[in-house]
Amino acid sequence: MPLDNSSYSLALLRLDGRRWNELRRLSAQISTQAAADGSSYLEMGNTKIICTVDGPAEGRRGGAGGSEAQSGEAQVEVNINIAGFSGVERKKRTRGDKRTTEMQLVIKEAFASNLFTRLYPHSTIYISLHVLNQDGSLLAACLNATTLALIDAGIPMSDYIVACTAGSTSSYSANDENADPLLDLNGLEEQELPFLTVGTVGATEEVCVLAMETRVQIQRLEGMLAVGIDGCKQVKRILDGVVRAHGKEVLKKTL
Amino acid sequence: MREIQLSLNKTQKIRLQRALEKLESLSSKVNANASVTIADSIPVSYEDGVLKGHGTLDLNGEVVATVCGVVERVNKLVYVRTLRARYKPEVGDIVVGRVSEVAPKRWRLDINYSQNAVLMLSSMNLPDGIQRRRTALDELNMRSIFEEDDVICAEVRGLQHDGLHLQARSQKYGKLERGQLLTVPPYLVKRRKQHFHHLEQYGVDLILGCNGFIWVGEHVEAKDDMVEDQVNKPKSQNIKSNSNSGTLEEQERTYTPIGTRQNICRIANAVRVSATLGFNITAEVIMETVDLSSSLKLDIHEMLGSEFCVLVAEGEAERRSINKKG
């Protein structure tokens, strides 16, 4: 690990004191906003995200894909807004930012295939994500927050989509034979190490999202993927707890 | 509707907690046991045969929930009722909606459903009250009946091939004026015999739309005053332009006394408090909240404070425990 070559190999502790297979603290809330049909707030370590879901609602007129909106199933539209103050440096992101656009597309594709969109013809589901703070695992956090908001909106889906990241302890160039896989990278680790984002359908091993922007040696990939899928199972357990606690809260008030 | 953010102090927090705990102990245990989240399998006995309803899915021979909610069983039908979702219309529901578009021969209404609802010109009573074929002239004058952004009360007629149709074939339906529209989560409004409430002591109409749109407005007598209009004024006169021109007489007719306005606000705030706490909204619950607020001599704006909220929660717990015993 280039950041602190010595300490990891000695104590097998990462920069923030975690071991290789530990997640950061993951906490979430459901139904945080009044006006939206569904909403959630999710923290994955220091990555903080607000998600709101609007719809399924009649598609806005004159929007993109006017003919698409008349099809027999609901359209999913995703909009990600990354706050200027969310990163280490204050950065103004333009609307057509390629990375954001790609994340939007990935989220859209993942949920469009998982939701039962056929039940809502001629309508659109608007998902809007606001990134308040970013510290690694941005795409994974977005996917998790969206899942919770969609559950709150009461839109049927086959299973949760849960995601987390997995990396490898040494960079591509360092020809390290015994590189360990790592789970749930934070911002600093993401800058230095190769990593991938893996999303699964529920606690199964069915991968529905797999994104990787860095180079890694092929023999390390399998280990990373296995660790990532295992992480997804842990995430699913946590999200499940959040949903159940929320459901109990709502049910006790209504008769 | 959580636009009221409660900032409770410690005692209030504990009192609210206690009231909610009491509610929890009173709520039927069946609910708690039958709650499922996505991908939970629902136990069914296949010998009897089973009909899978909304919110369920057959996955490798198992019935699995696809939404988070409560399992309901009606004979062989198994379905999951979602905790919170958009409104799902049923035939005969009374809904309140807002006109989003005036289209040829129809209005499109936003009723918190996944599509806009359609109210055909032919499925409502004309202002002159005469039954006849709708002519092209009627179609041209549609805006004099309802305009964009008008609030309307109507009944669900059914799902046709081109969307959800509404009808308004009675004097009690139609445009709602001089009042407030509130939106609450639809699950808080249960379908009942009576959705129109005339609160006589306040001179206020309360309409609990099944879609979670609630209307609180000045009471209007359901009479054919439109017919008089038509007699007094020639047909070319546009009703809308009349009300805008603001003759003195007209103003007097549409004037709402301040007392009634305050009553409207008080009742609206009672609805807001109930919705914030997540209690089912019925006329009785709202009236009790209003009575509580006036017996405490609270100002209207004080009703949205945290203290009143806690009091309402305690009152509700009390009420339900009495109902349980009685």
Image (cartoon, coloured by chain):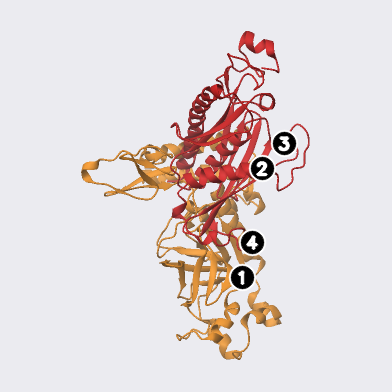
Rendered colour, chain B:
orange
Label 1 with label 4: CB-CB less than 8 Å:
no
Indicate the chain on which mark 4 is placed: B
Q: Amino acid at mark 2?
A: Thr
Q: Quadrant of residue A91?
A: top right
Judging by the rendered image, the residue that carries numbered circle 3 is A86
Between the C-alphas of marks 3 and 2, the distance is 14 Å
**Foreground: A98 or B102?**
A98
Of circles 3 and 2, which is in front?
A: 2
Between the C-alphas of marks 3 and 4, the distance is 45 Å
Q: Quadrant of residue A175?
A: top right
Q: Quadrant of residue A101?
A: top right
Above-or-below relation of B258 to B310: below
The crowd level at tag 1 (other Cα within 10 Å; few <14, some 14-19, many 20+) is some
Looking at the picture, how far across and down is residue A141, in whole percent? 59, 35
Between the C-alphas of marks 2 and 4, the distance is 49 Å
The crowd level at tag 3 (other Cα within 10 Å; few <14, some 14-19, many 20+) is some
Q: Secondary structure at mark 2?
A: helix
Looking at the picture, how far across and down is residue A174, in whole percent? 66, 18
